[in-house]
Amino acid sequence: MIMALVSRCKDIKNHFLYICTYFHEIHPIMKQTLITNIKELINIEEVKKPFVAGKEMSNLKTLKNAWLLIEGERIKDFGEGIPDARYQIPDTGYQIPDTGYQIPDTGYRIPDESADNHASGIRHQASEDMTIIDATDRMVFPSFCDAHTHLVYAGSREIEYVDKIKGLSYEEIARRGGGILNSAKLLHQTSEEELVEQAMSRLSEIIRFGTGAVEIKSGYGLTVEDELKMLRVIRKLKELSPLTIVATFLGAHAVPAEYKGKQGEYVDLVINEMIPQVASEELADYIDVFCDKGFFTVDETDRILNAGMKYGLRPKIHANELDYSGGVQVGVKYNALSVDHLEFTGKREIASLSNSETMPVILPGAAFFLNMIAAPVRRIIDAGLPVAFASDFNPGSSPSGNMQLILSMACITYRLLPEEAIHATTLNGAYAMGVNEDLGSIARGKKANLFITKPISSYEFMPYAYGSNKVEKVILNGEVVL
Ligand SMILES: [Zn+2]
């Protein structure tokens, strides 16, 4: 009888162990990273908002002397002072070599900027599943969300840049190898593999400057084949890069030379051939049109957006960069996620945006590089609207994806307060590319895409010290990548 009971208990025990093993395999213990002694944790949210607008943009929530816990790829918790007892792991003092996620080698070599880079922010392996990072004197920011770029391109256009300085006309520049059409010619001659390699090196660079999510457009193809090629390159980048990437189809970026004088036929090509193929291969998340003087008219934009919407492609529009083009209004009509550039924005544009879910996106890099007028951002914010700032990283008018520089320009040129500029480059940028549920702020459950600064005196130092890289460590999807 007793033997039978012992045997039965053994069975139960074995069964219990079996269940434990079973669950452990299905639900393996997730890797945790605890960041302690954070001087200030920036842009925290207790309740997630899609974006911040108007006066609210200057109300940036932060936590001094904070800690942050990452579990798996997400933010699990954060708080002030010493981490909750349940998260405290004794410090073994054991230091491990950096074995974080390695950015795929694209041949691009990033110089070691400062020797003190490795002096602190020390990582300890507290246990197999827990890494502790000491962030004494350092701040933690949510990664920048760059909602407007054209960073897939072939070669560069510095000769055109010098020609512009010399005062050459647009036609002369085009003859010498400048302009969107010449970028298209070069892209046509470049293989998909080479385009991926060049773009990956640009992605590595923007990761170093603190970007955690980026929108990338097509638009240097301008034929069915080459537009699809560009979008396939972006799809490949999504697979290879730890960044969150969204793709926008911009077939209507410029009119190819062979369609000069018959622009309507090119619009037909975009509508009848490009959009259906892009949609059938699910290559794009959004659709864009350059709706401006000398590019595409409001009527053409209307036709293209209407066709895109039938395939579920929500618009993001290039609008009002060169004139009061009607681009803002046609964008709002089709519930665009964003309207971008906005140098020519008056009362009518602001009134149109006021009754919409469309994010105004400002691109100071292009305005700076081309010496253009600045968009009236203060008037937009004073009207109670949100704004986002993005890099417009592209070879012709903004050959930089450095969002720290964009943050500085937002303050210097557009007179945003640092708090407004931080919102404009993080949460509002995330909304303008449709990733605000997951990114753009420090909130429980959001993806752990963030950076740890070098030792800095205050968060205002970020836009103030323009030109230098204040980012020391980067975490993407919960992994230390830098
Ligand atoms: Zn653009």
Image (cartoon, rainbow, N blue to C red):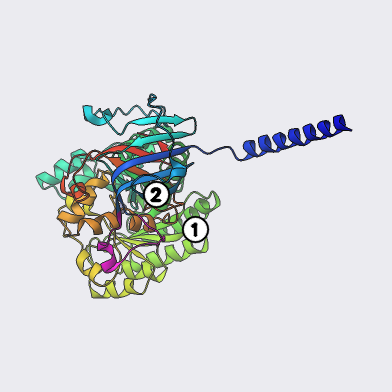
Q: Quadrant of residue 111?
A: top left
Residue 16 drawn at (x, y percent)? 72, 37
Q: Which residue is mark 2?
A: 78
| Residue 52 painted magenta | yes
Q: Quadrant of residue 237?
A: top left
Res 102 visible:
no
Q: Nearer the viewer, residue 444 or 136?
A: 136
Q: Secondary structure at mark 2?
A: strand
Dot 1 crowding, Cα within 10 Å, few <14, some 14–19, many 20+:
few
Q: Which residue is mark 1?
A: 272
Residue 192 drawn at (x, y percent)? 43, 36
State which mark lies toward you, 1 or 2: 2
Magenta range is 44-62
| Residue 212 painted magenta | no
What residue sits 48% from the left and 55% below the top?
Answer: 275
Dot 2 crowding, Cα within 10 Å, few <14, some 14–19, many 20+:
many
Q: Quadrant of the N terminus?
A: top right
What residue sits 37% from the left and 29% below the top?
Answer: 106
Q: Nearer the viewer, residue 124 or 364?
A: 124
Q: Which amino acid is tagged 1?
A: Asn
> Is residue 328 placed above or below 445 in the rendered structure?
below
Q: Would you say 417 lies left or right of 258 here?
A: left
Q: Would you say 307 lies left or right of 153 here?
A: right
Q: Secondary structure at mark 1?
A: helix
